[in-house]
Amino acid sequence: MQAIQTLLSNLNPGSQTTIENLTLIPLLQAETETLPPDYLTLDEALQGGRVAIAEISEEGSVPDLLLVNEGNRPVLLLDGEELIGAKQNRILNLSILAPPRAQLMLPVSCVEAGRWRKQSAEFVSSPHAYYASGRLKKMSQVTDSLRYKGRRLSNQGAVWGDIEMKSQRLKTVSYTQAMAQMYEQYKVSLEAYVRAFSPQTYQVGAMFAIADRIIGFDVFDSPATLHKLLPKLVRSYALDAIDPQQMRDRQDSPISPHSFLSAVHQVKFEKFPAIGEGEDVRLSGTHLIGSALVAREKVVHLSAFRSQ
């Protein structure tokens, strides 16, 4: 797809920063004037009180939530962002640009298996997102569901199972089996990573490596968006970096940032109508999977992960 190829061609890896075994490689765009984004992030929209996210009914539905945008600007929701409250905590199954003055059904996955009782009428946004290794698996599941069923569903049982195993490895106990407890227990360590990885001028994306092995990247259409969402991304990769399983899994040879970007150039693209504005583009290649939200003649968000 031309918009994605153009974006990739204009990205340049910057000087990397390594803390412990986690490395961030900034992805920089050409030094050109960039207009501020014409949308709000989810945090901004919720804080402004013009957007609300709630269960779809009093009974609720695990894989669906309702978003109401009463504002005059679109709202960007990030794949993997966590929503806290209502009957159980959820994560978004994909990135969405919610139009102004509209209602949308949001495809989500539950990340709190042991609770199905009302905690609040509406959701609030969490300061973190689904950890990166989980995003990879969920992205693959959602792509398959979209391709074969026309729906954006994860394998909910697999999501719960993965959270349970990660909690055991990190020796985290939650009576409701909430993913958020892992982030809370390791908050001090995770915030050290956030402080260490400061965004650079012209940075629109971030590529991450654990123990010198590139895991994946996220790219946005504006440095301003990257700056706002980078802390959530850092926490999601950092939770993997402190997981001993991630170290045991790193057996293959490392590749360079340029090689990884080049590999994304070679993937297969599949286009679907987006939820909200634009197109939902799915990327698949050898040992690589990704997704992109293309709207308003630009790539609003692109992410890709190394699958093996």
Image (spheres, rainbow, N blue to C red):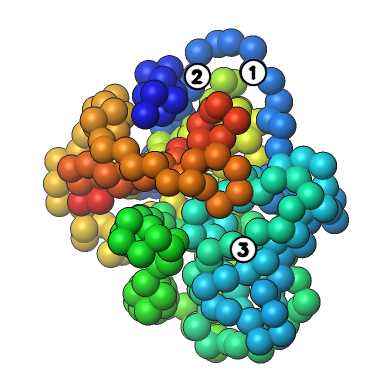
Q: Which residue is mark 1?
A: 34
The answer to whether 253 appears left or right of 146 in the picture is left
Residue 290's place in the image compared with 132, above or below, is: above
- Residues marked 2 and 1 touching at CB (< 8 Å): yes
How far apart are labels 2 and 1 at the CA level? 10 Å
First of labels 2, 1 by sequence position = 2
Q: Which residue is mark 2?
A: 29
The answer to whether 286 appears left or right of 281 in the picture is left
Q: In the depicted view, which residue is nearer to us: 307 or 18?
A: 307
Question: For the residue labelled by badge 1, is the local secondary structure a helix, a strand or a loop?
Answer: loop
The answer to whether 168 appears left or right of 294 in the picture is left
Residue, x 46% and y 29% (percent of image)? 26
Residue, x 58% and y 87% (percent of image)? 115
Q: Percent position (x, y) of residue 258?
A: 29, 24
Residue 239 visible in this rendered orientation of the protein: no
The answer to whether 256 appears left or right of 156 in the picture is left
How far apart are labels 3 and 1 at the CA level? 31 Å
Q: Quadrant of the N terminus?
A: top left
The residue carrying pointer 2 sits among few (fewer than 14), some (14 to 19) or many (20 or more) residues within 10 Å by Cα, namely: many
Question: For the residue labelled by badge 3, is the local secondary structure a helix, a strand or a loop?
Answer: strand
What numbered label is drawn on residue 105?
3
Residue, x 68% and y 75% (percent of image)? 55
Q: Residue furthest top?
A: 32
- Residues marked 3 and 1 touching at CB (< 8 Å): no
Residue 148 visible in this rendered orientation of the protein: yes
Q: Percent position (x, y) of residue 44?
A: 76, 47
Amino acid bearing label 2: Gln
Amino acid bearing label 1: Thr
The residue carrying pointer 1 sits among few (fewer than 14), some (14 to 19) or many (20 or more) residues within 10 Å by Cα, namely: few
Toward which corner of the image does residue 128 lie, by quadrant?
A: bottom right
